[in-house]
Amino acid sequence: EAAVTQSPRSKVAVTGGKVTLSCHQTNNHDYMYWYRQDTGHGLRLIHYSYVADSTEKGDIPDGYKASRPSQENFSLILELASLSQTAVYFCASNQFSGNTLYFGEGSRLIVV
Amino acid sequence: AQKVTQTQTSISVVEKTTVTMDCVYETRDSSYFLFWYKQTASGEIVFLIRQDSYKKENATVGHYSLNFQKPKSSIGLIITATQIEDSAVYFCAMREGLQGGRALIFGTGTTVSVSP
């Protein structure tokens, strides 16, 4: 069973502050993704990566940075958090040939 | 650009009946993969079923099956003999192409409520 773990699971951040959401997977997957979930918008892709030290922009990358320092770890960074970034963030991973995505538990971020 | 659309925001059914939910997609690729995921009340998102575009047979897993209509760019999910535990949000998703480096794009989800 694929294991994708996220931290923190919940966070309250101040507007203008820096937020880092971390994701760790233990299944040797090549691909990792960050999605954002908002009511009425489903899951929207922010950034993804298919190899360590490289990241790609998704559909809504503005205001977010990503970092993939190793195959197992993928971080989402909000340098200057804004109210509009209040959402639930999901990390996911999969293998090149497998396609099936395995999701983390989600991280609820509230920016005040 | 690829796009996935789920127009039904919510569906209510009675336990042990069948529920069908719709999904249409847009893509320029001749090969693509279609998925359905389920998000439970706890927030957990799990994979349910997948359809490869080059396969003519509709995929079936347990009491989940797909209605793949390629000419209509449609991939419906059918849940038979529904149970209370099937109450959840169901997401349709698509991945274009056979090459690596492509991410899944999701629809906005359909909330299914199963009552006794």
Image (cartoon, helix red, strand yellow):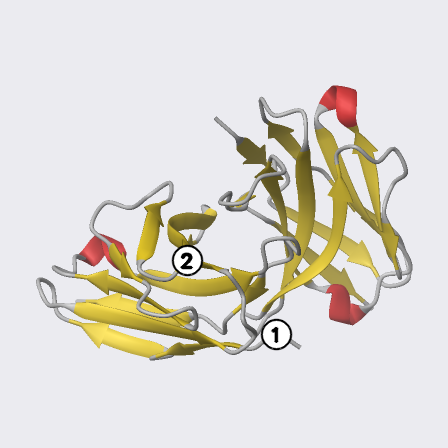
Q: Residue at x 54, y 46 (%)?
A: B104
The three-letter amino acid code for the residue at tag 1 is Ala
Badge number at residue A51: 2
Tell me what residue is drawn at x 54 percent, y 44 percent: B100
- For label 1, the residue is A2
Q: To which quarter of the image does residue A66 belong?
A: bottom left
**Residue type, numbered disc 2:** Val
Task: Say above or below: B16 vs B106.
Answer: below
Of the image marks 1 and 2, the number of the one nearer the N terminus? 1
Q: Residue B57 at what x, y percent from top left?
A: 90, 38
* Left or right: B102 as drawn, with respect to A97: left
Give the chain letter at badge 1: A
Residue B56 is left or right of residue A37, and the answer is: right
Q: Check the picture and name the quadrant holding the N terminus of chain A.
A: bottom right
Badge 1 element: loop
Residue in the image at 34% along x and 60% along y: A87
Q: Secondary structure at mark 2?
A: strand
In the displayed structure, does residue A58 sit left or right of residue B58? left
Q: Is residue B109 left or right of residue A17?
A: right
Q: Are marks 1 and 2 on the same chain?
A: yes
* Quadrant location of the C terminus of chain A in the rendered image: bottom left
Say if B86 sits above or below A99 in the image.
Answer: below
- Up-down relation of residue B28 to residue A110 (above or below): above
Q: Nearer the viewer, residue B93 or B81?
A: B93
